[in-house]
Image (spheres, rainbow, N blue to C red):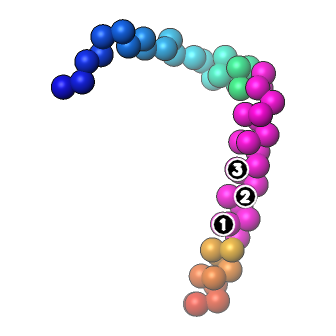
């Protein structure tokens, strides 16, 4: 069993605290937004493929 000695459990954040911290990091905001946009593009491609097969 792996040792947990020295392991620090981070304190839980409220949603408001998480959103504040997230918005303080421009790269995190940009990467998340880009990921969501790309996911939407990929979802549309998948839906188009499925519609063509039906």
Q: Judge whether residue 16 can be spotted in this image.
A: no
Question: Callout 1: few (<14), some (14-19), or many (20+) C-alpha neighbours within 10 Å?
Answer: few
Residue in the foreground of this view, choosing between 43 and 28: 28
Distance from label 1 to label 2 (Cα)? 9 Å
The residue under the point 25% across, 18% down is 3
Please name the residue that numbered disc 1 is placed on. 43
Q: Does residue 23 appear left or right of residue 17 in this picture?
A: right
Extent of the magenta region: 23-44
Up the image or down, 37 lies above or below 53; here it is: above
- When the figure is inspected, residue 16 is found, relative to residue 26, above or below; the finding is above
Q: CA distance from mark 3 to mark 2?
A: 5 Å
In this view of the protein, can residue 53 be seen by the observer?
Answer: yes
In the picture, measured across the screen, residue 36 lies left or right of residue 14, that is: right
Location of mark 2 (residue) = 38
Q: Residue at x 24, y 24 (%)?
A: 2
Occupied quadrant, residue 7: top left
Q: Residue 52 in the image: x percent, y percent? A: 64, 89
- From the image, tell me which residue sits under label 3: 35
């Amino acid at each position: 069993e792996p040792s947990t000695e020295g392991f620090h459990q981070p304190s839980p954040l409220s949603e408001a605290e998480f959103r504040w911290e997230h918005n303080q990091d421009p790269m995190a905001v940009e990467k998340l937004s880009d990921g969501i946009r790309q996911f939407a593009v990929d979802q549309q491609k998948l839906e188009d493929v499925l519609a063509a097969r039906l």
